[in-house]
Image (spheres, rainbow, N blue to C red):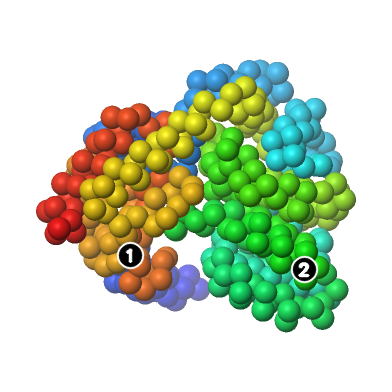
Amino acid sequence: MYGKFKEHLQNELNAIKEAGLYKNERLIEGPQQAAIQVAGKEVLNFCANNYLGLSNNPRLIKAAKDMMDRRGYGMSSVRFICGTQDTHKELEAAISRFFKTEDTILYAACFDANGGVFEPLLTADDAIISDALNHASIIDGVRLCKAKRYRYANADMEDLEKQLQAAQEQRFRIIVTDGVFSMDGNVAPMDKICDLAEKYNALVMVDESHSAGVVGATGRGVSEFYNTYGRVDIYTGTLGKAFGGAVGGFTTGRKEIIDMLRQRSRPYLFSNSIPPSVVGAAIETFRILDESNEIHDKLVANVEYFRTKMMEAGFDIKPTQSAICAVMLYDAPLSQKYAAALQEEGIYVTGFYYPVVPQGQARIRVQISAGHEREHLDKCIAAFIKVGNELGVLK
Ligand SMILES: *Cc1c(COP(=O)(O)O)cnc(C)c1O
C-alpha cells in the first residue's frame, strides 16, 4: 500500500518545493539568546519570540533545576487524575494575579488552550465572531465547536459591528481576537471591541500570546494598555514567548468559565500535565516581572530606538505598539534576497510574502527583545542600511 501513498507524498512535496514554500530548518548550535551559533557562525537573532530575553535566563534555569529536585521530572498523568501538584496551583495563581483575573487553567500549549476553549462553552445555538487574522489555533478551536461562525476584517470595527448585528439571533455571542497580530505588530483595538461587545451583548476573548509581557505600561497585556480590566471575559496565552519561551499555555478569566473548562476541555482532560521544571521556571518568571519593570522598560526602549533609527534611515515600517517591526519591501523575491543578504551580515531575520501576508505586502519581520543590547541593535540597523543601499531599497 505504501508505494502509491509514497508517490503521492513525493509529488506533493515536490509541488511545495517548486512553489518555493518548502521549509528548511536552520540548526542553532547553542542556547536561544540574542547572539546564536548557526552553522558554526555567530549571528544576531531578530526572529525569536524571546521578547523579554528570558529564554536563557540564569534565574529561570536555576528555578527549573530546583523544582526538578523538589517535585521530580514528569507527572505521568493528566491534571484531574493524579497530575496536579501544589506548584501547578501556585503558577495558576501567579498568572491570575498578573492578568488581574479570577482563575487560570494550564495547558500543554496555547495551541491547546485555544483548541479547548470554545467547544465546552458554546453550542450550535451560539455565535463566534472572529478576526480574519486570528492565529491558526483559534481557527482550529472554532472548527471543533458547533457554534455559528462569523468573521470580520482585521481590526475593522465597522465590519465587527455588522457581524454582531448579523449574530443577534443566536443565544450567546463571543468576539475573539489576537491581542497583537504577528505580521504587522498592531494591537487589537480592545477598548472599541469591548464597547461593541456591550452594545451587542457579546462576550470578549483575547489571545495574548504576542501581547502579554510586551504591551501596556508594565507589560500586563491589552487590558493594561487599554484599561479594559473587567470587560474581557477570557484571555489565552503562552509560556512559549515572552514568559521564558519553553512550552505551556493557559486560559485565564472568569471563575465559572475556568471551572467549566476544567470539567469539559478536552486538551486539558486528555493530555499530560506540564512538567515541574517548566512550572518552577514559570513561577520564577512571574516573580521576576513582579519585582521590577526593568526588563519591560528595556524592551520598550529597544523598540523605540530601533524604529526611530530605521525610519530616520528611510525605511518603511508599519506602525506598531508591540515588539514586532515589519520592514516593508512589498516585493516577494526582494524580501528573500534581503533576508539572505542580512544573514551574510550576521543578522538572522525572516522575510515573509504571500500567502503568509497579503499579495504585494512582502516584508522582513524584525522582533525586538529586551535581550538585545544597544550594540546588537546598531549592528542590525547598519546591516539593514548596507543591504538596503546594495539592493536599491534606500534612495
Ligand atoms: C504562538 C501563538 C500560539 C501558540 O502558542 P504555543 O504555546 O506555542 O502553542 C497561539 N496563539 C497565538 C496568537 C500565538 O502567537
Name the kind of residue labelled 2 in the image.
Lys
Q: Quadrant of residue 4?
A: bottom left
Tags 1 and 2 touching, CB below 8 Å: no
Residue at 14%, 52% (x, y): give it. 389
Q: Is residue 267 left or right of residue 354?
A: right
Mark 2 residue's CB less than 8 Å from ligand 1: no
Q: Which mark is residue 93?
A: none
Residue at 28%, 62% (x, y): give it. 329
Q: Is residue 173 left or right of residue 111?
A: right
Instruction: Report crowding for label 1: few under 14, some 14 to 19, many 20 or more residues within 10 A (C-alpha).
Output: many
Name the kind of residue labelled 1 in the image.
Ala
Residue 66 vs 110, above or below: the answer is: above
Residue 118: in sight, yes or no? no
Q: Which mark is residue 199?
A: 2
Q: Is residue 52 left or right of residue 84?
A: left
Q: Secondary structure at mark 1?
A: strand
Q: Position of residue 226 (x, y in %)?
A: 63, 49
Q: Position of residue 62 (x, y in %)?
A: 56, 19
Q: Secondary structure at mark 2?
A: helix
Q: Position of residue 241 (x, y in %)?
A: 53, 42
Residue 21 vs 374, above or below: the answer is: below
Q: Count the numbered circles shown.
A: 2
Quickly name the residue at label 1: 362
Instruction: Report crowding for label 2: few under 14, some 14 to 19, many 20 or more residues within 10 A (C-alpha).
Output: few
Foreground residue among 240 and 78: 240
Residue 293: in sight, yes or no? yes
Q: CA distance from mark 1 to mark 2?
A: 37 Å
Q: Nearer the viewer, mark 1 or mark 2?
A: 2
Q: Residue pushed farthest left? A: 390
Residue at 61%, 46% (x, y): give it. 225
Chain-order first, disc 1 or disc 2: 2
Residue at 29%, 71% (x, y): give it. 18
